Amino acid sequence: ETGVTQSPTHLIKTRGQQVTLRCSSQSGHNTVSWYQQALGQGPQFIFQYYREEENGRGNFPPRFSGLQFPNYSSELNVNALELDDSALYLCASSRDRGSTGELFFGEGSRLTVL
Amino acid sequence: AQSVTQLDSQVPVFEEAPVELRCNYSSSVSVYLFWYVQYPNQGLQLLLKYLSGSTLVKGINGFEAEFNKSQTSFHLRKPSVHISDTAEYFCAVSSPDSWGKLQFGAGTQVVVTP
């Protein structure tokens, strides 16, 4: 059983650019949640995808968007990057919107915006 | 709305000594509670969870936590720590209508020294 994998692991962008982060969910999982973890803080919920549909969103602006594909992998897109977008972006997969009570996290994509 | 407060940002502890990490939550509905651990440069790993039933929950690596509804707390304990327990620990809360959409605390850094 493969775990949750994220790519890229590190990337550097400049203000105003766009970025796409990718996540492959664990085998058998149909739900992906994305979190933003700024330095020294706890993760903040961005949004969740369940069976290719957005299933809830946190307090993030519309320039944060996502997709989930038929194989349940997912992308997080951020447009018009700002300095405050610098953070570790974590993807978590689960079964059935997390109803089993456990999320499986990847190791994250560290984004630096200059 | 839910929120989580982790009362200690950093807890230094000697090897083989006990440790307690404090977590308080606020919520107007039923809650599910979690403790996650994050080792350096890694994603989050579930230590234990409380969904229902016994208020004393045992997790991996010798950790346990007690759900106290009257005090709205979910403190994490380990009777004897190892150097390898050095990590960041996060308390998180969700509810039946927000499966997989965790609200995390700011984290507690545990530093174990010989």
Image (cartoon, rainbow, N blue to C red):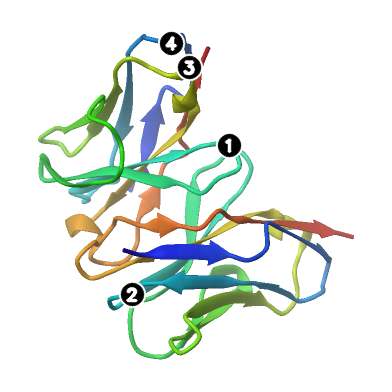
Q: Confirm whether circles 2 and 4 share one chain.
A: no
Q: How many residues crowd around disc 1 within 10 Å: few (fewer than 14), some, or many (20 or more)?
A: few
> In the rendering, at what x and y percent does residue A101 appear?
31, 66
Residue for badge 2: B31
Say which of marks 2 and 3 sits in front.
2
Q: Earlier in the sequence, mark 1 or mark 3?
A: 3
Classify A77 as above or below A107.
above
> In the rendering, at what x and y percent does residue B83 appear?
78, 58
Classify A43 as above or below B94.
above
Q: Which residue is drawn at 49% across and 55% down?
A: B45
Q: What residue type is labelled 4?
A: Arg
> In the rendering, at what x and y percent does residue A41 appear?
55, 45
Say which of marks 1 and 4 sits in front.
4
Q: Is mark 3 on a helix, strand or loop?
A: strand
Q: Distance between the residues labelled 2 and 1?
A: 27 Å
Task: Determine which of the numbered discs, if any, sits on residue A39 in the image.
Answer: 1
Q: Mark 2 lies on which chain?
A: B
